[in-house]
Amino acid sequence: MRKITAIFFCFISIGLFAQGPHKKALSIEDFEKWNTLKNYSISNDGKIVAFEQSPQQGDGMLVVVSEKKQTDTIPRGYNAQFGPENDFLAFHIKQPESTIRKAKRAKTKKEDMPGDSLGIWTFNSGNIVKFSRLKSFQVPEENAKWIAFSLEPEPASKDSASNQSKEKQKQKDVEDLVLFRVATSDTMMFRNVSEWFYARKGAAIYFNRQVKDSTDTFSSLYSFDTSSGEVTQLFNAKGWVKKITAGETGEEYAFLFSQDTIKEKVYSLYLGEPDKSPEMKLDRYSRGIPVGWSPSENGNMYFSEDGTKLFFGTTESPEPAEKDTLLEDEKPKLDIWNWQDLKLQPQQKVELEKEKKRTYLAVYHLELERFIQLADLQVRNITTIQKGNGEIALGYNEQPYLRETSWTGKQCRDYYVVDIQSGIKREIVDKKSFVRISPQGKYVLWYEPSDSSYYARSTDINNLEAVPLTKMIPVSFFDERNDKPTDPNPYGIAGWSEDDRFVYIYDRYDIWKIDPSGERVPANITKAFGRRNETRFRYVSLDPDLKYIPSNETVLLNAFDERTMSNGFFSVRFNALKEPDLLTMERVHFSNVKKAKEADKLIWTKQSARIFPDVWISDLDFDHARKISDANPQQEQYIWPKVQIVEWLSFSGEKLKGLLYLPENLDFAKKYPLIVYFYERNTENIHRHQHPAPSRSVINKTFYTSNGYIVFVPDITYKTGYPGQSAYDAIVSGTQYLVNSFPYINEKKMALQGQSWGGYQTAYLITKTNLYAAAMAGAPVSNMTSAYGGIRWQSGMSRMFQYEQSQSRIGGTLWEKPLHYIENSPLFFSPDIKTPLLMMHNDNDGAVPWYQGIELFVALRRLDKPVWMLTYNDEPHNLKATSWGNRIDLSKRMFGFFNHYLKGHPAPAWMGKGIPALEKGEDLGY
């Protein structure tokens, strides 16, 4: 009762404050000062919290809050990391924004831009030590007596330009490694370091010093004992050392080495132990390695947690390129598209660099001194378990299904159990998308779309029967609201018990405890509380290192009430079949939950339309909660939105919901313009906070309501083959409901706005209705017949699957349903458009081809319809987050467009006379 009362009085106080007379409307100039928070962390003992607070433009700060409610700020600090023993905080320090800006204006090269510094705050002394020229730093997970970090080498001395250039070339591949002793603040520096590695448990640091003379390169590998402070040289030879790694305790180490002087180097694998010289264990001629293959510098290399295995990547040995005797204009340059290619040429080109660096997982067994090649040209991807300790792994072969992915959009694969000792692969399930292996490797679980059920199979070769897990349970384990012409996705699994005895599977609301062997009867852990109360439960993992769910401990469940849109947390034990216990439920959205590793303390954020997601700290029951940040106190000076859910019957007879955002100073005697924004379903986002910020593609609801607009966000459901009509039935019916129900909405001053799929629906709607005075469509598909055969240039994939199986929801090919493609294409109904249209479609859009916007623009231009298109150069589907100038520009133009048509403001110059190419960049026409 205490918590409910607190919520009630909070609501009342907000409502009363909203009547205050002196609040002002947000302006575009206010955006840059609005703060955001990110990168929250809590010390292992739960006594100190750190997070970043930054304005959208300008210098931010690192905020550090202690349990004694003391707050410290570090200007321009970020990427902070606590010491595992709670005795220090290490962090980056950015250069001042003014310094960066000055360097950019001077056209400083990227590699010469002012760099970060490292800050180390030792709590016992209270001192902060700083080091400039930082490249990176590392703190071990345990026993952090030393902090290791690398610095850019000291700038070359002021000598002749040629000497500086030579020195810079020598330093290109090396850095200065500094070791900082936390207890005393003493440092040790090692120059010309090409690579270094800090063992996870903090016992040792390995590093390679690389020195060049006029003809040769020499490598020397060293170890640093963090307890004794001793430095030991382990290896010294002419050549190149790469991929240094060590076991968790630092007792074993490995690296790759090559003496090849050409660019295409072939490496050998070396292994060593403390105080012993390393031995070469594998090269291109070793037994078991595929002919022509060798260890690769491009693969990940790591020891198993128990130190008995070394995993690394192998691939075909590089061959030196033949000497090129042709001139550039004598070489043919083309792409050859072959109908039998597994991937289209554009996708191959997008993935080219990744494929050039592809490696195939292999393992070296240290005790057996045995090399085993695990992955191969068919089973190219393999995942180990138990941090490498497991005796089996799960691999898959996707190649039989790659070609059809172009039109199905599905990622089907054949899965194999791989024996780590022998490399033998055994297929366990074929042509599946959702497949998981249990933490101990006893079972493989998969979802079967054909009967909407989960199955499991033992990895024991003597027990190969597929066991149905959910087939007889009378609830659905797939997305019950799926309205796309494809098989619905499953809700997924929460995890496994510690011994693989049970798997925990989600339905829409609850969590089921199921025996993968099929011997025990399934049980509903949450006792159907979720389904009875339309509340979704999802497990919250508070320990990222834990690969199972502890059944005998109280764990945290995130809860979302679909009726009230409330969010909160319950607690439950997975070995006790009882209703979960309520901890807290509020009309907010909770996120970013993190637990202190060694204390019963949580940090988290909560937000609503009015409440900024500040940082809170509490115990595990969410009692004694305390807000420890106040990022935007200036919010109280501005008119803010209030939001409510509205319900209506669509033209198809379906009951729908939507969100209505109103200015908090709403005057019921006035008429307000309405902007309708949409995508698909959005009502569950009622408690998401949208801070004032420049647009990347869509309206900022907070900004527009502050400036006297009402914003409506309707949910949309779809019928296969009729996406456009479905949008019309939902959006227009919802708009008419508002006009009939809320007299303060000006029915003659309403507009549409959407981006991408929302942009398409905007373009479609204005071919069917003149209800809206203006429309803004970002990146709209205007012609499904041409878009169907197009390419998503960001991924290189065909767009076919989107129309047949996915969001566009046509449900068939262009030749099977040509009329559906035409009827759902705004372009073919351009003559019916009477609504002024603003579009944004950028020339580097990797999702919706730019020509889709052009097709609609040139059609409307020919028909003498009012239409404008904003094309931001070299910008993707949505404007880049870093493109501040473009985002401000879009915000101004969209605001000016809506103000003209919905508020009667004069049209900006860019709308009236346009901006000729000759005046580009000179006259912005605001």
Image (cartoon, rainbow, N blue to C red):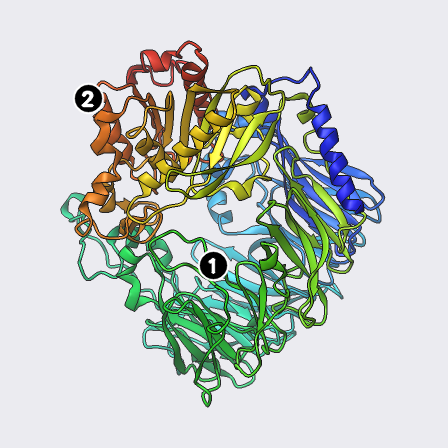
537 vs 408, nearest the viewer: 537
| Mark number displayed over residue 802 | none
Indicate whether 723 appears above or below 916: below
What residue type is disc 1 on? Thr
397 vs 115, nearest the viewer: 397
Residue 819 at x, y = what percent? 19, 43
Indicate whether 687 appears above or below 385: above
Residue 252 at x, y = what percent? 61, 73
Residue 441 at x, y = what percent? 53, 77
Q: Which residue is mark 1?
A: 217
Residue 877 shows up from this direction: no
User: Quick one: which residue is furthest to the top in this view?
Assistant: 906
From the viewer's perspective, is the residue at label 1 or at label 2 nearer?
Answer: 2
- Seen at 55% across and 15% down, the residue is 670
For the C terminus, give its image quadrant: top left
**Left or right: where does residue 427 sit relative to residue 786?**
right
| Mark number displayed over residue 862 | 2
Counting residues from the start of the chain, the first of labels 1 and 2 encountered is 1
**Left or right: where does residue 498 sit relative to residue 433?**
right
Residue 624 at x, y = what percent? 81, 48
What residue type is disc 2 on? Arg
**Left or right: where does residue 361 sit relative to residue 60?**
left
For disc 2, the neighbor class at 10 Å (few under 14, some 14 to 19, many from 20) is few
Q: CA distance from mark 1 to mark 2?
A: 67 Å
> Regarding mark 2 in the picture, which secondary structure is present there?
helix
> Regarding mark 1 in the picture, which secondary structure is present there?
strand
The total of numbered circles placed on residues is 2
Indicate whether 816 appears above or below 105: below
